[in-house]
Amino acid sequence: SGSILDTFPLTTIIDNSILTFVLCKNLLPFQSSNQQQLFELSRSNGVYFIHPEWVLESIVQFALQPLEYYEEKF
């Protein structure tokens, strides 16, 4: 199951059964070091920046697809 958050999670509960995804098509270059720090903090707290195709492929395959193929990185 999943939920849509109305605020951006800066920290997450350390629980392997809870994953936080941000669906994004392309990450743009950071305009400030603050944006980069927020991105890195989010990633270190278990937030995944995933291409929306991951959701569709997971539904079609009836299984979660490997994140590394769909994760947005810099």
Image: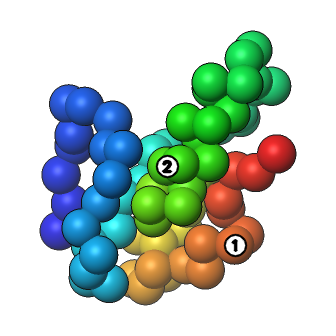
Q: CA distance from mark 1 to mark 2?
A: 17 Å
42 up-or-down from 15: above or below? above
Query: Which residue sits at x=22%, y=40%?
Result: 5
Which amino acid type corresponds to the residue marked 2 in the rendered image?
Ser
Q: Nearer the viewer, residue 37 or 28?
A: 37
Q: Which one is nearer the viewer's eye here, 40 or 20?
A: 40
Report which residue position mark 1 lands on: 68
Residue displayed at 45% across by 80% down: 64
Crowding at label 1, few (<14), some or many (≥20) Cα neighbours within 10 Å?
Answer: few
Assign a secondary structure to mark 1: helix
What residue is shown at x 44% (from left), y 61% (from top)?
A: 45
Quadrant the N terminus occupies: bottom left
Query: In x, y percent, where is residue 29?
Result: 80, 25
Q: Position of residue 3 (x, y in %)?
A: 18, 52
Q: Earlier in the sequence, mark 1 or mark 2?
A: 2
From the top left corner, tell me how far across and down residue 70 is, in percent.
67, 62
- Say which residue label 2 marks: 42
